[in-house]
Image: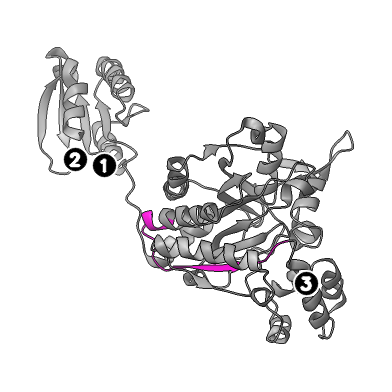
Amino acid sequence: MSTFKAPKGTYDLVPPESADFLAVREALSAPLRRAGYGYTETPGFEQVELFARGVGESTDIVTKEMYTLTTKGGDELALRPEGTASVLRAALEASLHKSGNLPVKLWYSGSYYRYERPQKGRYRHFSQVGAEAIGTEDPALDAELIILAHDAYRSLGLRDFRILLNSLGDKECRPVYRAALQEFLRRLDLDEDTRRRIEINPLRVLDDKRESVQRQLTDAPMMRDHLCEGCKAYHEQVREQLTAADVRYEDDPRLVRGLDYYTRTTFEFVHDGLGSQSAVGGGGRYDGLSEMLGGPPLPSVGWALGVDRTVLALRAEGVELQLPSATDVFAVPIGDEARRALFRVVTALRREGIAADFAYGGKGMKNAMKSANRSGARYALLVGERDLAESVAQLKDLQSGEQTAVPLDRVVSEVGAKLA
């Protein structure tokens, strides 16, 4: 027994459960690839300032949850707590926005890190699939991303999720709302940390999950009552596009999300089967983030979907993913000569795209067949000394028990035909 364990708040992915996570990643990214999003990958750590500027210095993510370190050279780095700032930084550094083909559509998948109190659905290391459409302001683009996430969840068999939708306004109408909200919040009975947050970013207070705070926010002013005509029209177009695509949503005027960079469209995917950590994904528009990072004006929109939470949501609904078998054929040699011959056949099967495994370690027939059954393979391929002398292999259907002799030089084509 190893004396080492995974760090607190983290988890290992091992078979067979890891197959579900791979299937979820594939399902979440498949609609993006069909919609023209290209894959991007960024480092697991970035300069601290990237997240302080982009995510927001008043957020819990930056003030309480980031893992930071100082390198031997004196650089202040942070393990990435989210993906958008890193992906936008990469796009700006590579000058993708100068290609003349906007929006720049990118998708990504990776691990993220936040120092939080571990609980079901909330980990210190977690996995997400994300998407960003950079450089274009268009309500159809906002709707596209919401539809793609909706369709990805549906393709997995997930049904009991809800889409919450809101608008946070823009640089024209947000300041008016901010002032009204600050005036309201200053009259409340709040602790000193929350009072400081009122002055930095009062919307963060609306996102406070403590019941003692939420009770006092019943009569708080709503952003929807302060939207300018442009933001109202933009938001209505997003809503119309979703309705036309038969995507149901709920207007949630209190939806803020936990990051400072959001403007206009904001949305969240929630699943009520997950308890307190009900959000399985979310995102929104962030038209000013590029300028915060020192880039040109690039209105953008994106989302991130939690792989871990999506798996938990599937389990909460009792959805069993239809996963392809990890092994189609399991080879069982009897004798050294048969072992050499059958290993060559297994290699040929794999090269033709057929999943094949081998009874390693010199197992006897009985133990080798147990391994074949445990592998989930459809067929067992057996070769003994007599079979080798006749240049045949015994192909056994592990479901029906039927067994037939197949010439060794035709095993690949015969198995391929049966699996087609």
Task: Name the disc covering residue 398, or none.
Answer: 2
Label 2 crowd (10 A; few <14 / some 14-19 / many >=20):
some
* Marked residue nearer the N-terminal end (2 or 3): 3
Picture residue at 70% right of the left edge, 78% below the top: 210
Provide the residue span drawn in magenta: 153-170
For the residue pair 202 and 68, the one nearer the viewer reads as: 202
Of all residues shown, which one is farthest toward the front? 229
The residue to which callout 1 is attached is 373
* Marked residue nearer the N-terminal end (1 or 2): 1
Label 3 crowd (10 A; few <14 / some 14-19 / many >=20):
some
The residue to which callout 3 is attached is 176
Instruction: Give the CA distance from mark 2 to mark 3.
Output: 70 Å
The question of residue 368 being in magenta is answered with no
Q: Position of residue 371 (x, y in %)?
A: 30, 38
Q: Is any atom of residue 120 visible in this view? A: no
For the residue pair 167 and 79, the one nearer the viewer reads as: 167
- Which corner quadrant of the image does residue 114 belong to? bottom right
- Element assignment for label 1: helix
Q: Is residue 9 left or right of residue 45?
A: left
Instruction: Give the CA distance from mark 3 to mark 1.
Output: 68 Å
Q: Position of residue 92 (x, y in %)?
A: 71, 37
Looking at the picture, which amino acid does disc 1 mark?
A: Asn
Q: Nearer the viewer, mark 3 or mark 1?
A: 3
Looking at the picture, which amino acid does disc 2 mark?
A: Leu
Task: Name the disc covering residue 210, or none.
Answer: none
Q: Position of residue 198 (x, y in %)?
A: 82, 72
Q: Position of residue 274 (x, y in %)?
A: 51, 69
Q: Decide: is 276 above or below 344.
A: below
